[in-house]
Image (cartoon, grey):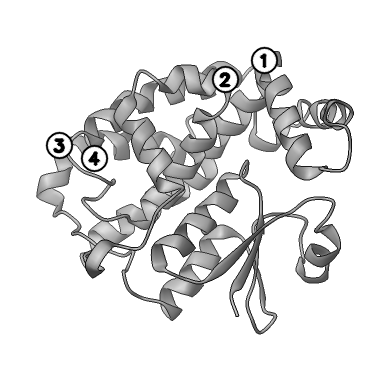
Amino acid sequence: MALRIFGSQNSPYSVKIKSYCQYKGISHEWIIRNSDTQEEYSKYAKLPIIPLVVTPKGEAMQDSTPIIEAFEARCPEPSLYPSDPTLRFLSELLEEYGDEWGNKWMFHLRWARAVDQDIVSVRLAREMMPNQPAEQAAKMIKKRMSGRGFAVGSNEKTAPIIEADLLEVLPILEKHLQTRKFLLGNRPALADFGLGPQLYETLIDPTGGDWMKPYPRTCEWCMHMVDLKPPAGNDAGNFEQWEGLQSTLEPLLKHAGLFWRGLW
């Protein structure tokens, strides 16, 4: 039997887990959480969030980072963790940065402007309420979600800060990714699963997509991060050493440090 993943293609945390399972070769069934699957989802979910992973034994797991940590212990190869403890720490730091701060970029841009609200609400309506007229369902979704910027600290005062921050980090990422497939070298680390899916969701929306298109290598990377496959021939690639990463990774770490110091 396979894992069941209840999620949404419009949820960065859901596509994070879906892609992780693909990369690790973990047999799974991808189930859209919508009105048709809500009853089954509710049997296992302790919180009304996605993704929800249900194991063949009926164990329910929520929250993307603990899910990955649990399966790294169960399915250790190919590992997301560099053997160098310093690089592993930095990877975990950047994963947290992506999950917590990167989500502000995505959520804010998705719901701050009418052009994004209109398109995304229809997309969500078709996914979440397949048996209702999309236009009617989209109006309900737009009304609810466009007023939830507070969930990520998005308001008139913070909007310019969140937007400027994204525009500052994109060229940093673009330069760093020019000479490598992933953030720490030629194999994905936990850091990639934190940042990549958030930027993928940003990319597929109108405003976020317009802002990201001048950075093609970053776009390519985040699209790759939500559709990983098992390494060919069991060759997972290598993590680089700090000396090779430092010149372009250090600016990203310094930028992320603004989040950790609470200066936004």
CB-based contact (under 8 Å), mark 2 and mark 3: no
CA separation in Å, label 4 and label 1: 34 Å
Say left or right for 231 vs 115: left
Q: Which residue is mark 4?
A: 249
Q: From the top left corner, tell me how far across and down residue 139 is, in percent.
A: 85, 25
- Alpha-carbon distance for marks 3 and 1? 38 Å
Calculate the distance from the C-alpha at mark 2 to the C-alpha at mark 3.
Answer: 32 Å
Q: Earlier in the sequence, mark 4 or mark 1?
A: 1
Position of residue 250 relative to residue 16, above or below, is above
The residue pinned by badge 2 equals 206
- Mark 4 touching mark 3, by CB under 8 A? yes
Work out whether mark 1 precedes mark 2 in sequence or the reverse, and give the earlier one: 1
Image mark for residue 149: none
The Cα atoms of the two marked residues, 1 and 2, are separated by: 7 Å
Mark with earlier residue (2, 4) = 2
> Farthest bottom residue?
57
Residue in the image at 46% along x and 47% along y = 226
Q: Which mark is residue 247?
A: 3
